[in-house]
Image (tube, coloured by chain):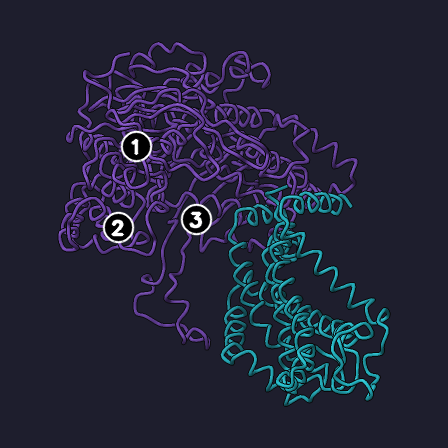
Chain colours: A purple, B cyan
Amino acid sequence: MPIKSGPPLLSIDRLAVEFVTPQGRVQALHDVSFQIGTAEIVGVVGESGSGKSVTAYSILGLLPAEARVKSGSITYLGRALRELGGAELKAVRGSEISMVFQSPQTALNPIRAVGAQIADVVRAHSPAGAADAAVRAIEALREVRIHAPERRVHAYPFELSGGMCQRSVIAMALACTPKLLLADEPTTGLDVTTQRAIMDLLIGLTRSRGMSTMFITHDLGLAAQYCDRVIIMQNGRVVEQGATEQIFMNPGQAYTHRLLSATPQAHTRLIDLIPPSEQQALGVSSSLLRASKPTRAAVTPVLRVRGLTHEYPLRGAQRSVLGLFGRRHRSGDDSRNKFRAVDGLSFDVAHGECVGLVGESGSGKTTTSRLIAKLVKPTAGSIQLSGEEIADADPRAFAKSAKRRLVQIVFQDPAASLDPRRTAFEAIADPLQRLARIRQPAALGRRIRDICDLVDLPQALLGRYPHQLSGGQKARVGIARAISVNPAVVVLDEPTSALDVSVQAVVLNQLDKLKRVLGLSYLFVSHDLNVIRLMCDRVMVMKGGRIVEQGKVEDLFKNPQHPYTKSLLDAIPRIDFAWKAGSGGKLLSEFP
Amino acid sequence: MRHISALVSHTRRMIAHNWVSLAAITIVTFLAFIAVVGPLMTAYDPYVTDLANVFSPPGKLHWFGTDQLGRDVLSRVVASARIDLSVAICAVAASFTVGVGIGGLAGYFGGSFDLWTSRIAEMVQVFPLFVLAMALVAALGNDLRNVVLATAIVNLPFYIRLARVEAGVLSTQLFVEAARAAGNGDARIISRVLLPNVMPNLMIQLSVNLGWAILNAASLSFIGLGIRPPTAEWGIMVAEGATQAMAGHWWLIVFPGFALALAVFAFNLLGDALRDMFDIHSR
């Protein structure tokens, strides 16, 4: 296969890794073989459980205690890494092969300053003293384009944003000029614009230093945009590998094809995300789709929001001793004590419409979703649901009112939104018993089985606990729970962002089907513009608590007006090779 | 019913994997058995003196020997188990229910209730625990009821703070918001969502606490407060035995001391076993 000239930098040959668990042995990698040459960027793409992270950890010998490398070899510049002893392996880690981890906040030691952590790496691999190491730490931070590195070198991880933390982790990884960098999903959890900046930085540094990078990701768009070669993995096996353009234009294997179709793109339709063989099983079809395009008559909107505002009091103002005795700390300018998360939002949602709410972290979209779902009481503003005003109701009192069933919410993290000590059945039964007052076991059972059929949740799973369900199954339980009481409006807070792309494809189609079959209206909050384009009729872009632009989905995508919208659209990774050839992929410096 | 049978089968599986849990459960069951049934099974009355037989070493007639008044040490050790365990269980049960109740509400509701309960709990905690227990027993009077009360009060802040933190963290979880969206009021959320989820962590503390409470009661009677002779109690026996140790009568201090150590040890180990039993992820 076409790798750059010369002997490979890293060669993995028939690697097999197994995990010893209480339930038996689990084979994580079967017979994985690939090579990485000098000065090339190789993407390893797969969904959860594909074994891509396990591969990276086995290269550096960082597997957990219950994992064993059963067979196979890993060769770096002719040296067999599996045979290296402790001290030799330590010499390799950091100075020859380095790693950037998935979650920057957890990869950094929370109780040490960032500069000290970089200096540690430097001193582990060179005879530099404390002063020299400190200077090199500042240089490393400057290279990753952090403003004012002399000051930031003393910062703790909690004082830095996600993007800045990730830059620090990259600085740590590159401090001793390794030849190979393993980047394990380095942009997970970052905003789309930050993601673009970090990826540009990483790839730019790789190219300028003549290093190689193994870039692990689940996002095909990122792999297409930044990698020279791509390796597709599934269930611990290498499904396909080759030059990026080759793989994406002409996928050889069915799985690659399925992954590609499932990734929302600028030109796909919702139904195209899943293979035709499965469309029938889901009960969605193109005929249903054609019939569904909404013809909006002049009806009262089901959700009507005017001037919605929410402020969070900052902690210092609350905890003063004066506050303890009932006197408020009076400062001249009260606004210093408050943070305005949502600032005068006004919009409508019509019956059967799906309105998207797009924004990055800190834009206020999560707060908005909680306000509409009546989990938080707004500071000011009006929310009218089916004509009735609900803004002034306290969430706790509202939970017991009859209007509670009118608006329900599907949360972002299906695992965290299910009570770990309740089965799926109990989770779905809860709102039915509380809000629909179906207490009789027979009626309850029947109703839950009907709902399971609607969301394609196999009934055998009802007796399971959340930790025994897969991500997609948990998502379906969350959706079943939300729609069980026939709400008027469902707030969907990034319902598929925690899911694999193929599972996301199915869940999005199911959500669309439910909307049409049950006549629901959606407020779909997301940071992923491609998903919004597929699911929504109208979309609103939020920044700093305000709506900066709103309109029909096609209009916004073709003709964005506001510069922020344009930058968001620009930052979406694309599987589009004409684009890749055209731009230069310039480095974006850190947003202060 | 389904929950109980699931718990039993889960416990059986857990015991098979972890012999320490098995050991802990066995010893605690044994101690409970001794406490309940023991006094009925011993050959001698723990309070009957036999001045002809003082200081007889362990032998066929008296397995643990006799003390300075000729009382059978074995019967006294067994009788004391009942007293010590019941004192510990009562005290810990009281401080657990009151402490978790207050702390849980403080963690869930926050605000000034939380502020005030935390400050009061801190004021109690300022004092060294044992000194405070001593002071309370001395002030309230030297009897069993006051030992239980003192132990409970001294232990209260511990549960208040623990429950407050657990409830506070759990209240921010998404599934609590989901429960609210499903129409559950505060009372239902606290009783059906928060409580089952904080219980596992509290169970471990409860168990270790039982060990500490036994030690506390024994320590108080060791220094002469609370339970007084001639009542059979491990602390008293150790105190009296200590004065005789130099004369070579080792059995007076070794057997009660060993019983005390075994009880505390077993309860500490039980904490781990309880946590495994309640751990939903290993099911």
Residue at image mark 1: A182
Mark 2 belongs to chain: A
Image point (50%, 14%), residue name: A275
In the image, residue A515 above or below residue A465: above
The mark that comes first in sequence, 1 or 3, is: 1
Image quarter of the C terminus of chain B: top right
In the image, residue A442 above or below residue A105: above
The mark that comes first in sequence, 2 or 3, is: 2
The mark that comes first in sequence, 1 or 2, is: 2
Residue at image mark 3: A308
Q: Position of residue A7 (x, y in %)?
A: 21, 19
B117 or A291: which is nearer to us? Answer: B117
B188 or A218: which is nearer to us? Answer: A218
Mark 3 belongs to chain: A
* Callout 1 touching callout 2 (CB < 8 Å): no
At mark 3, the secondary structure is: strand
Give the left or right position of residue B138, taking residue A155 as reference. Answer: right
Residue A143, quarter of the rendered image: top left
At mark 1, the secondary structure is: strand
Residue at image mark 2: A117
Instruction: Name the residue type under label 1.
Output: Leu
Instruction: Name the residue type under label 2.
Output: Gln
Q: Position of residue B219 (x, y in %)?
A: 62, 79
